[in-house]
Amino acid sequence: MGTYQVEKIDKDSRARFIKNLLNDIQALKIMLRDGMIESEVMHIGSEQEFCLVDENWRPTQDAIRILKAIDDSHFTNEIARYNLEINLDPEELKENCFSVMEKELRLLLNKAMQTASKYDNKVILTGILPTITTQELSMEFMTPNIRYELLNNAVKLLRKKDFEMHIRGVDELSIHHDSVLFEACNTSFQMHLQIAPDDFVASYNWAQAISGPILGIATNSPLLMGRELWSETRIALFQQSIDTRSSSYTLQDKLARVTFGNSWASGSIIDIYKEDIAQYEVMLTNNVEKDSLLELKKGNIPKLNALNLHNGTIYRWNRPCYGATEKNAHIRIENRYLPSGPTVLDEMANFAFWVGLMKSRPAEFDDITKVMDFRDAKDNFIKAARNGAASIMLWKGIEISTRDLVIKELLPLAYEGLKKCTIDSNDIHRYLEVIERRANGNSGARWSVLNYRKLKKNMKQDDAVIALTEAIYENQQTSSPVSEWPMIPKEFKVRSNARLAKHIMSTQLLTVNENDMADMATTIMNWKIIHHVPVLDDKNELCGLLTWSHMTEYLKEQSDFTTTKVGDLMVREVISVTPETDLETVYELLEKNHIGCLPVVSKSSLIGIITLKDMTTI
């Protein structure tokens, strides 16, 4: 979103901002007309987001002080206190630019690791950190920065209601939340490629066309809060975490701010920007001191701050970008859909693969409308996010597996494109062979899913995500790409660091309503060998507890059970805990009150249950 200051929106600030926004469009139009946008020398750039975890592999709140201690302008804050970002120096697209960038990235990550270790933190590269829970999405974990606060307020104002997350994969996640902090679950490796102005739209459409297979071979984020969801869950999560739309009884076609788009681009980069200004409301404003048109008249290169700020609140997976220095201006495509990790080598291989493809666009794709239906490209992208390398792509109207498409058609193009850019031959083979091995083996997502399923057979969910996170970290310390990572050994032991109720509670709950017939409820308890069942009222709030011992006492006094309701025999005075209750308190409550379970409640909603058996297994 840039380093310029944002301000609270009011009627006057909005009017000033829109005037500057329209001036920026006009200024860019003049610059394109007069050949003021760089077109000879091309550059690449990237941004590395990463997570900070403590000795127990859980997210920390130390990003601000670690950033201060690093004291390096390459580093910047992210929205959450457990994330930081590295902005790498641009490199001219030639010779050994990728290995130079890889070396810089490794040096900066090592700097972050060394500094973080002083605060008992570790650095992890992963699209979604497996150990994130709802606690780390509370406002206390938001970085205290005015732009994040204003972004949160702007999205909530446009939505007019809390956020809703509904993601279905092998498991299902359905949750309400009161801030944009679900966005903080997502960490990515963003890649930038400068594009010549007269080739921008054709390049942009080609970038859209290849997004599906590239994402499919690079997925790395299959888990969120212990649920196995999409191969790249970030795609669904990011769209929903910052969605300004809210559901209603009317059928609306309002566009999501996180978007793949709805059609091929046409015209120039100006037309993409115009479409976004027309489609999306202004969320943030800034106080622009220099009018872009006046700057042009003075012979200066304008920053187009208003345009860049508005563009920064529209999250296209392939985003058009404008950049300027004192001497020149350029336009580029930002690839935003690839995850952080699993290793630096995997990320740089993805980068080289993408750039190689971008620079070897077949002539038939110059007018993409004659070759490929846009909805096929969009469908490919969604299928890749859901199913990764196992998805079937529609490529020029023909069905082909992602693996075959990458190996047989796209990798040869990438080799050709990198050679055309005079990239060092050793680098070309080193990076693209990583892609080939991954296409024939495991992606980060597949490796995580296979190991997580294996771990859960012998561990509680919390211990399994901790073990997985530890294994990801240990593998990242090697030089091996994810396709060569070994399976987590059977004898792998995790030292349980469960400290709170949420770490050991069972979340797959059998509940009954207070108006349900008791004989049905008790029969199900008998079938499932369950001794405690939470009772909910018509508002889905906890109102009682049905226990086997209490029910047995009731049966001794009643001969007719057929007309009895759950509410007649449930325990009404229920002792409960919150997700953040420490386990020592949980144990004391169970012992002191001679009870076998404790419901876990958050904001009147039942979210879990802890039994004595759960306590004895930690």
Image (cartoon, rainbow, N blue to C red):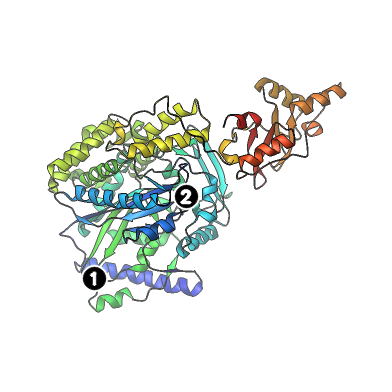
Quarter of the image with the C terminus in it:
top right
For label 1, count other residues whose C-alpha is less than 10 Å away and answer few (under 14), some (14-19) or many (20+): few
Q: Is residue 276 visible?
A: no
Which one is in front, 362 or 592?
592
**The disc labelled 1 sits on which kind of residue?**
Glu
Residue 581: image location, x then y, percent: 63, 44
Is 137 located above or below residue 8 in the figure?
Answer: above
Residue 410: image location, x then y, percent: 23, 38
**Residue at position x 55%, y 41% from top?**
174
Name the front one of labels 2 and 1. 2
Give the mark, 2 or 1, whose residue is nearer the N terminus: 2
Is 578 located above or below residue 266 in the figure?
Answer: above
**Residue at position x 28%, y 32% from top?**
439
**The disc labelled 2 sits on which kind of residue?**
Thr
Residue 608: image location, x then y, percent: 62, 37
Q: Is residue 303 visible?
A: yes
**Residue at position x 51%, y 35% from top?**
496
Residue where numbered disc 2 is placed: 60
Q: Name the outermost residue toward the front.
A: 118
Find residue 326 and name its label. Answer: 1
Label 2: which secondary element: loop
From the viewer's perspective, tell me whether residue 410 is left or right of residue 565.
Answer: left
Q: CA distance from mark 2 to mark 1?
A: 39 Å
